[in-house]
Image (tube, rainbow, N blue to C red):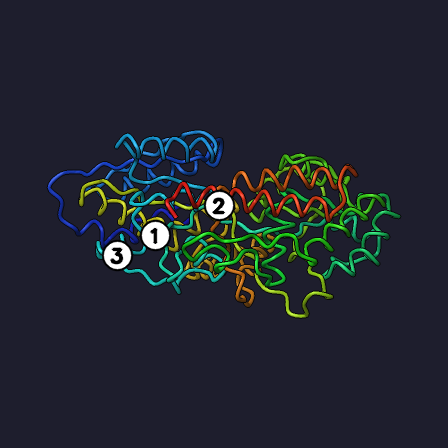
Amino acid sequence: MSIRNYIVGAMATAMSVTTALPALAQTEITWWHAMGGQLGETVNEIAEKFNASQSDYKITPVFKGTYEETMTAGIAAFRGGEQPNVIQVFDAGAATLIGAKGAVIPAQTLMKDNGVPFDINDYISGVRYFYADTDGTMIGMPFNSSTPIMYYNEDALKKAGVTPPKTWEEFQSVTAPKLKAAGYVPLSQSHLPWIFTENFYSRHNLEFATMDNGYESGTPVMLLNQDPIKGHFAAVKEWLDNDLFAWYGTGWTDNQKPFNEGQVAMWLGSSGSFGGVKSAAKFPFNATYLPYWESLTKDPTQTFIGGAALFAMAGHSEDENKAVAEFFRFLTSPEVQYFWHKETGYVPITTAAYDLAKKDGYYKETPQAEVGIKQLSLPGGDWTKGYRLGFYVQIRDVMNREYGKIFAGEKTVDEAFETIEIESNKLLERFARSMGN
């Protein structure tokens, strides 16, 4: 039996409980998402498999554009009473949707109320609380989850006579100079706010914002004008000036493309980019954890996820909510998660799915695909579960603008971070007022 047929058969098995449930008529639900291209095809395939696995429910996926366009459309639809049953919302926008009172039904509550077993401890540790509330109740169901990791060109490191750096001290004193001497740009990275800011804080277990990184109700204050992050960006600027690091722009592919083409030796990107790197790179590559500053910690902690989650929107009938709960049962089954993981590169969100992938020998063939899961499973700390901050899309825009000024030499690190903190906290205050806090 092929692995694909095995998965299809296992998906049917996973739905055996659902198929035993009586229903007078088929209940139809809609799923708005932001997955275009091949990812959209995989979303459609999951929906088709769910629909084929039983006859009580039918889900219809609808591509609504970018993350921002999908969220904006969902909020507008909610105000007009025409919201979908399920909507995909990205990490930076989650606070906006969760903050909209009465807009969503917590995934955990929805599943339990409809007889679908749920235990948050079944989810990988770096995944389980990112979309949860202060009490640990999962609000959004993690969907396309990934975390930043370091990819490296094995030929480049071999030519330079170095190994992947575990610390930034090792990178700047040993790895980067030798890679430069070997004719490579040592390092690039995609998404400065996600990798060099948010996950910098998580990797070093540093408080990102007051009020439990924003998870508590009220108006948090961001803690960005701080010595650790400013020291990191001062080092990055020095690497840039000495050709030990290159920054090709804010676009994701701007920085990945030179790595794929063999110009850059190491690239910090998403674990979900594994498939893209595999298809584009003409050299052997591998991956490892994000480096950390040994001067800040001797015990680096886990990173947290990026990507998006699925939210069950309120305002629908009990039958439709039941259908969403059954879809979440199907989606989180080990077989579907493994299928999603293999097809897209996003991490499986449950330990059962991870165990299935290991049992199937997937990581013997592709050890790079396991790095993100292992990093998400490292010991956590007080500040590693993520953040919950309103108007965070705009806050990221401020970061990108000011980081660009640092790299262009238009502002010092101190000046840029003072601006980032002031403008970010003004945005948080405005968000709190808009939410009635």
**What distance separates the C-alpha of mark 2 from that of mark 1?**
49 Å
For mark 3, give the secondary structure.
loop
For this orientation, the residue located farthest to the bottom is: 298
How far apart, in angstroms, are the residues tagged by discs 2 and 3? 38 Å
- Give residue 26's position: percent from left, percent from top: 17, 38
Amino acid type, residue under disc 1 in the picture = Ala
The foreground one among 339 and 418 is 418
Quick one: label 2 or label 1, which is nearer the N terminus?
1
On screen, 68 above or below 19?
above
Query: Disc 2 marks which amino acid?
Result: Glu
Q: Which residue is denoted by mark 3 in the rendering?
A: 116
Above or below for 199 versus 144? below
Mark positioned earlier in the residue sequence (2 or 3): 3
Q: State the SS at label 1.
A: helix
Q: Residue at x 71, y 50 (%)?
A: 152
Q: Amino acid at mark 3?
A: Val
- Give the residue at x 53% y 61%: 384
What residue is shown at x 29% (from left), y 45% (from top)?
A: 102
Residue indicated by mark 1:
10
| Image-quadrant location for residue 379 | bottom right
The residue that disc 2 covers is: 429
Helix, strand or loop status at disc 2? helix
